[in-house]
Amino acid sequence: MPLVPHSVGIFILAGADKFIISGIIGLTTISSYLVVFQISTVFIFVFDAINKSYYPWLFEKLNENNKITKNKLWVLTYIYFIFLLVISLFFFFHGSALITFIAGQNYIINNNIVGLIFLGQIFGGMYLMINNYLFYDKRTLLISTITISSGIIHLLLISLLSYFWGITGAALSFCLSKCIQFLLTWLNVYKITVIPVPIKGG
């Protein structure tokens, strides 16, 4: 039952916003947003596959309850984060060309819009990685609270930002919401100290 709100939050972050955008900026404009978003969902499948392979190994290492092992885990986690953020830069510089190559000449979209949407998906991948520690500690209610809160924030942001900045505002809203979801999860992992965090001295 605690994960039901989690599913609702995922739906809001992944789909409910499209209804709001279509009402604010129109069906013609939203088609460009949807094309970029659809292409970016490739990352969802990639991150999900990585996570399914990673978390059994992670849980096994956490069960060892060894300080040195835990220190190595957070080092690997942060290296992974840096790697993903570096990848995101590609989409801010070459995202428009990539979308045009995949979807055709009818979809020439600003690099910043593409970059923001893909960065949002990357924050989603980072969230999955750190969220494993909450699952390990059986904090399912906390996970649901974070997800539904992020979903509500997303709806508020997209209503406001897409009204003022159109499709760019919609992309920014998605990116910010995924970033907030990641940061809230990271903060709570820090609080329960399941994984050592550098500023806590490992």
Image: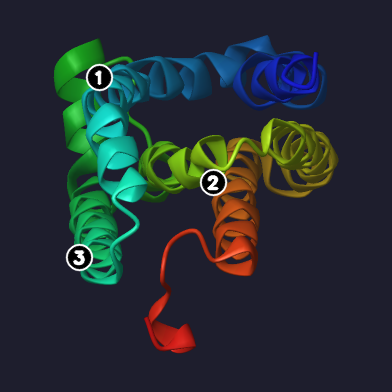
- Real-space CA distance between mark 1 and mark 3, rounded to the nearest whole angstrom: 22 Å
Q: Nearer the viewer, mark 1 or mark 2?
A: 1
Disc assigned to residue 49: 1
Q: Sequence order check: which comes first, mark 3 or mark 2?
A: 3
Q: Which of marks 3 and 2 is in front?
A: 3
- Residue 58 appears in the rendering: yes
Name the residue tied to disc 2: 175
Disc assigned to residue 72: 3
- Name the foreground residue: 194 vs 144: 194
Quadrant of the rendered image containing residue 60: top left
Q: In this view, does 49 lie to the left or right of 123?
A: left
The amino acid at mark 2 is Cys
User: What's the residue at 50%, 16% (across, down)?
Assistant: 34
User: Residue 150, relative to residue 102: is it above or below?
Assistant: below
Q: Sequence order check: which comes first, mark 1 or mark 2?
A: 1
**SS category of the residue bearing label 2:** helix
**SS category of the residue bearing label 1:** helix
- Residue 104 appears in the rendering: no
Quadrant of the rendered image containing residue 125: top left
The amino acid at mark 3 is Lys
Q: Around disc 2, counting alpha carbons within 10 Å, would you say few (fewer than 14), some (14 to 19), or many (20 or more)? A: many
- Real-space CA distance between mark 3 and mark 2, rounded to the nearest whole angstrom: 29 Å
User: What's the residue at 30%, 17% (across, down)?
Assistant: 45
Q: In this view, does 89 lie to the left or right of 128?
A: left
Q: Position of residue 85 (x, y in %)?
A: 28, 57
User: Residue 130, relative to residue 24: is it above or below?
Assistant: below
Q: Position of residue 73 (x, y in %)?
A: 25, 59
User: What's the residue at 23%, 17% (across, down)?
Assistant: 105
